[in-house]
Image (cartoon, grey):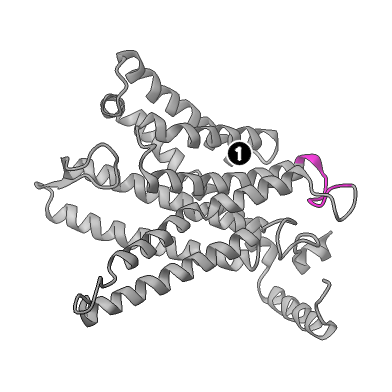
Amino acid sequence: RAGTSPLLRSMLERYKVTVEERVNLKHVHRRLQVVAKLLIVATFVEDALRMLFKFDQQQQSMEIAGWTSPALHTLLPLLSLAVQSCGALLVLASSGVGGEVGCYLLLGWCVWHPFMYGQAGNREFVLETATISGGLLILLSHLLLLRTKAPLLGESGPGAVGTPARVQAVGRVLLVSFFLSFALSLAHAWAVSLPLGAGDGPGVWGRGTQAVELVLSLLVLSLCGLVVLGMKSRHVALLLAAAVFAAAVSVTAANVVTLLLHSSDTFPVEDTAGMEGVEADAATIADHQRYFFFQSMSTVGALLLLVVHGPGPLSADEQDGPLEFASEKTVA
């Protein structure tokens, strides 16, 4: 690449060859691609199964969401089951036009989903859905590239950029939606905790909390900026995926233990617009927690798709073309 010294380039090539002698990166790449696709459809599959096996509860959810027609209480869950199951199966089963159709179905569902459940005002819900949509767009850009057989840079020279590259760039921007919200929430918490005047400080522990919130929010904002610009975006996406996975597993494990120990109690429904102050039994809360867990897994899948397919030419990393593994060059 331009700007890279011959010595550094030679060292990187030797390092890649050494790594690939011990690990078949091409096989790892393919397996990671399969894992990413499985994870990104996880929330859609789980939701479709919930529609199938808990249809009565879903009808009640439609009524709670504000749909007044009894016919819609039945039709909307059926629509949810059909769109999500078909979209997920097409994404998993096909790397051609069928996969593209699956992506379009699931993207359409991501747009409609918050309105169907009356969660359009739930910022966290909407932005996590946008992050999953970003992963679907990255996958769609890859499928478009395979179908057209055209390079990401287009056919008219290095200055041209094709549709797959534009789709991929939009996907990258949407991918960080949830993390931007998280960073801004931390920044807001830091701002409101600042002392208003002399003598009103929060104490030593409070100041430490403020510092952590500020540093963490700046760190997340910086990572989001790198993903949007396409600078070290594969590494950043892998780091964020690991963080989301660890957080989802730890939070879910803690919630499961709490629900098992207090299965006869009721708990407040959290992170659901329109149900503030409502309490539900342990089984209902467990159902909510399972949904949020699989939504987090789909967020992990979206990030891994960026790791697998890269940021594309509308980025700082791959503006001269996509990176290639040495194993792929030798096989070609």
Give the residue displayed 90% in from the left and 48% down from the top: 156
Quarter of the image with the N terminus in it: bottom right
Q: Residues within 10 Å of mark 1 (few under 14, many from 20)?
A: few
**Extreme residue toward the front, this view:** 197
Q: With respect to residue 199, does 239 lie above or below?
A: above
Give the residue displayed 42% in from the left and 60% down from the top: 184
Image-quadrant location for residue 197: bottom left
Q: With respect to residue 133, does 316 lie above or below?
A: below
Residue wearing tag 1:
93
> Horizontal and vertical percent for residue 259?
18, 52
Q: Identify the element where label 1 is drawn.
A: helix
**Extreme residue toward the bottom, this view:** 7
Image-quadrant location for residue 182: bottom left
> Horizontal and vertical percent for residue 124?
38, 48
Instruction: Work out whether residue 327 can be spotted.
Output: yes
Quarter of the image with the C terminus in it: bottom right
> Horizontal and vertical percent for residue 131?
50, 49
Front-lying residue, 155 or 28: 155
Magenta-drawn stretch contains 150: yes
Instruction: Work out whether residue 48 can be spotted.
Output: no
- In this rendering, position of residue 227 left or right of residue 282: right
Magenta-drawn stretch contains 149: yes
Q: With respect to residue 225, does 49 lie above or below?
A: above
Q: Type of residue at label 1?
A: Ala
Front-lying residue, 275 or 52: 275
Q: With respect to residue 327, does 252 lie above or below?
A: above
> Horizontal and vertical percent for residue 251?
30, 60
Image-quadrant location for residue 201: bottom left
Q: Which residues are magenta?
A: 147-155
Main structural element of the magenta stretch: helix, strand or loop?
Answer: loop
**Extreme residue toward the right, this view:** 156
